[in-house]
Amino acid sequence: MPERPLSLWRQFGYACGMLGWSIMINIIAVMLIYFYIPPNNSGMGQLIPQATVLGIFTLLSLIAASGRLIDAVTDPLIAFWSDRSHHPRGRRIPFMRVAVLPSVFFGILMFIPLEYRESYHNVWWLTAIQAAFYLSLTVYIIPYNALLPELAPGSAAKVRLSTWLSLAFVLGIILSSQTPALADLIQGAFRLSNRHAAFQLAIGSLYLLGGVFMLVPLFTIDEQRDCSGQPATVPLWKAFRHILTHRNFLVFIVADFSYFVSITIISSGMLYFVKVLLFLHEGIGGAVMGVMVLFSLLFYPLVVRLAGQVEKRKLMIWSLLCLGLAMMGLFFLGKMPLPPRVQIFGFALIVAIPTAFLGILPYALIAEIAEQDGSHTGQQKEAMFFAVRNFSTKLGQTVGIMAFAILTLLGKDPFDDLGIRLAAVFGGALCIVAGLIFTRFEEP
């Protein structure tokens, strides 16, 4: 571990990487379904047929699932290679360096279909490009996250650095949720009649911005100076098996998976909640996310303080339960005797508090688990722990997108909105399930 705590400037530089890839993955969560199968009042046509397989799985849900089959192999391999790397520049930074440009390139291509009509060609194109995008991003994310235990020695330092990471992640959510508003500006400035083209320019600009932020840690973090980890020597299968039999880690992963399914369902549905249930302009979705995040920042000092006084396990449980109940309330949007803006912004203010806790504590907990395991076994396998967590997160996001895409079959348009409302109930229920699972977690 570094002899001195990481300076504030280098903490900021490290967090910029999180901001970059947060922009990229949250654009997928916010825009993918809306871009390819938009509601009929969006001004855009569908690009992927709403055909189903086995009567339930939409093509878009199967596309999202296909990428996880590749991740199941690539995630642990990249983690294994990173943990065992003897590169003179370190075990993590060299991987991150080669991943930035491909991530930007394939991220942009995900929103450039082969044909601008319902087409099965778009299905195969999106499947291939998605696989390349997630592989590129994984090469960056897993080594990036594996730096955390070494950069922040001690529980308090981990909470502080995790706070920066949480701030960066939610800023990425804010920026990605501004895609519709940015598309409006572009469409007006260039007098574009094609709404798809406006979204593509907005998304491309944000992916380029995300790539710039991902470059910052490459210049601010020096593994020779800031880290002292040693390459692991344990074989791949033995390391993987050890992690998958780590009881505490498995409880964390199962709860974390349920949470990400839940939050992705809500993220994927936000533009639909605004446009279909409340009949507001889709650009309001970005303002809602911004209000939620900015209000949650007010509670960050409280999170840091309570994390040192109360078991993080208890804070996680109550945050998950409260967030789940709030999410289920989205079912009643448009049915309450309140102005539409009051309804959606009221939701943002309510969920801001549990969001503050859930943004900070998971990173600190998994870093503590990885560090404790390394001290106990003598093998530093940080990347492998974060690889399993990264795969679980992406799987949760994929299942969330699949679930929402399937529920749209039950109604996704004005006055035919049952699927969207049920998505809110399902997402909230899963968040509550995550809280109940976390009662089995033991504080490291």
Image: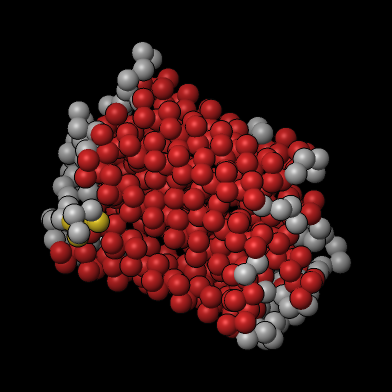
Looking at the image, residue 114 sits to the left or right of residue 209; the answer is left
Residue 59 shows up from this direction? yes
Q: Residue drawn 38% across and 15% down?
A: 338
From this view, report whether residue 339 is shown above or below residue 149: above
Residue 82 shows up from this direction? no
Q: The C terminus lies in which quarter of the figure?
A: bottom right
In-front residue for pair 414/440: 440
- Tell me which corner region of the image, top left, top right, bottom left or bottom right, holds residue 226: bottom right
Q: Residue drawn 28% across and 44% down?
A: 407
From this view, report whether residue 151 is shown above or below residue 159: below
Q: Residue drawn 32% across and 44% down?
A: 183
**Residue at the outermost top position:** 337
The x and y percentages for residue 158 are: 74, 55
The x and y percentages for residue 328 are: 43, 32
Looking at the image, residue 330 sits to the left or right of residue 316; the answer is left
**Residue at the outermost right position:** 3
Q: Residue drawn 57% across and 40% down?
A: 320
Q: The N terminus lies in which quarter of the figure?
A: bottom right
- Tell me which corner region of the image, top left, top right, bottom left or bottom right, holds residue 244: bottom right
From this view, report whether residue 332 is shown above or below residue 432: above
The x and y percentages for residue 145 are: 62, 64
From this view, report whether residue 4 is shown above or below residue 295: below
| Colouring scheme applied when the structure was drawn | secondary structure
- Tell me which corner region of the image, top left, top right, bottom left or bottom right, holds residue 243: bottom right
The x and y percentages for residue 174 are: 48, 42
In-front residue for pair 437/207: 437
Looking at the image, residue 168 sits to the left or right of residue 234; the answer is left
Q: How many marks?
A: 0
